[in-house]
Amino acid sequence: MGCISLRGVSKCYRVFDSPLQSLAGMVAPKMVVPKEVWALRNIDLEVDPGECIGIIGNNGSGKSTLLAVVGGIVSPSEGQVEVEGRVSTLLDLTVGMQRELSGLENIRILGGLLGLSAAQVQQRRDQIINFAALDEAILRPVKTYSTGMTMRLGFAVALHTDFDVFLVDEVLAVGDNNFHRKCIKRMRELSLGEKKTVLLASHGLGEVGALSSRLVLLSGGEVIRQGRTEEVLAAYWRECEQERVRVGHRVPLLDQVNPFGDDSGHVKIEAVRFLDSAGRESQDFLTGYPMTVEIWFMAHRAVDNPLFRVQIFRNDGVWVHGMNTYRQQLSLGTVEGLGCMRLNYEQVNLLEGDYYVTIGIWPDEYKSFLTDVAFDVHEKSYVFRVHSEREQGAGIVTQRASWRFFPPGNQVTEGLKRSVLQSQRNSDVAQTSDDGGPGEGEDESRRP
């Protein structure tokens, strides 16, 4: 149970230019020819029981349509779809929810819609309420809930139904951080512990990469890559960069402008270069090797101890690193005229990807946050690329680390086990003492 098989699956939508054309097409179909929009093209996919498969791609790539086809919500135009077992779809958390009714009443409604009997809903009600963490709010009408509370309720009900195949579309980022972590943990349990088959579509690459055993990359309704998580993610980053370059010809994303408004003009950034270990200008660097950021500036008047700041962002906007001269306790004294500042990274710890860089010169570290008056700032105006090896890990950064294996039954392993057990006993004794229970060597019967 839980197998999914797609062979040559395609989905085509017939689109008319206007409602009048649509009506004419119904009356005289041969007279009006609609446009064909292919949401999916020749999809082949095999999913084994207990696998968690991530589906990634840009907006409009076909992720939601693919899940809808697997879930039986949309019929394919071509090809065959085979799904073994009971399917639960989590494509919209608020479908079927009645806003005038309480959260408790909505648990009964949503549970029934997802295939639970009244007895099953009653049996699992407390688990659902505890998971959603709504407490007394469960008795209030859903219309009084925030968006996050409503999403938490829908997600909690869906996760406590019976299914063999679970289809999830862009709903992992529900609720606050604590609830988000709880959802990720539960998704892991479904796939790894309970051996449920999960098909997960998301733009959250961190979550989908951590949960999925392999990934499928869609573009224009076609599978352009599927395989190991890190390999497909690398291919997706390349596609995102190509799209960014195409958009860049229409939208000036990398203009050298100060987003804080007019700067003082006392100091101007004249040029920025990125240098490799040999001092050559480059935009491509290897993880673990040196990189230097060189900033040429012109101080048009004497300024006292200006602050230089470098900030690095991943190409999805995540801020990954920042450095300024004040935090390094670097005093520049009075500066006037043409000068150069270099920031030397002994080794780049970033992993594969494209990174934006913001360069700024400020009069002071803290005044800048209050007044937003800079000498000059180039916001995300520069790009460099990092290339990594698979052995350096996955994510955003690499760390120096090594594995050590302790085989079962080994003398060292047994010594570690004894140490862990003794530590646990000491911890239990200390906890009992803190809770008012008998301490070590104290008789419970002699306590008042």
Image: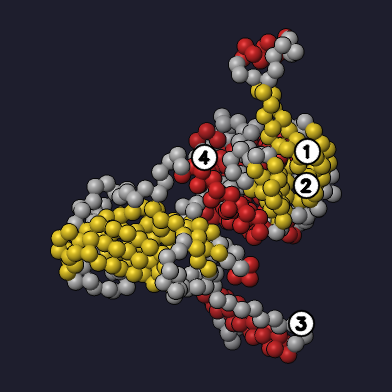
Mark 2 falls on what kind of element?
Answer: strand
Q: Is residue 211 visible?
A: no
Q: Where does label 2 land, which residue?
A: 45
Q: Is residue 131 above or below residue 64?
A: below
- In the picture of the structure, the residue carrying the numbered disc 3 is 408
Residue sitting at x 33%, y 54%: 378
Q: Which mark is residue 147?
A: 4
Q: Position of residue 413 (x, y in %)?
A: 71, 85
In the displayed structure, does residue 224 sit left or right of residue 242?
right
Task: From this view, report whether residue 226 is shown above or below residue 147.
Answer: below
Distance of label 3 from label 2 (alpha carbons): 39 Å
Residue type at tag 3? Pro
Tell me the number on the disc at residue 293.
none
The residue sitting at 61% across, 52% down in the picture is: 236
Identify the element where label 4 is drawn.
helix
The numbered disc on residue 9 is 1
* Label whose residue precedes the other's in the sequence (1 or 4): 1
Please name the amino acid that badge 2 sits on.
Answer: Leu
Between marks 4 and 3 in the image, the one whose residue lies nearer the viewer: 3
Q: Nearer the viewer, mark 3 or mark 2?
A: 2
Whole-percent x and y of residue 390?
63, 67
| 124 left or right of 5 in image | left
- Kindly report which numbered mark, 3 or 1, lies closer to the viewer in this rendering: 1
Q: Which residue appears at 38% of the width and 53% of the height? A: 381
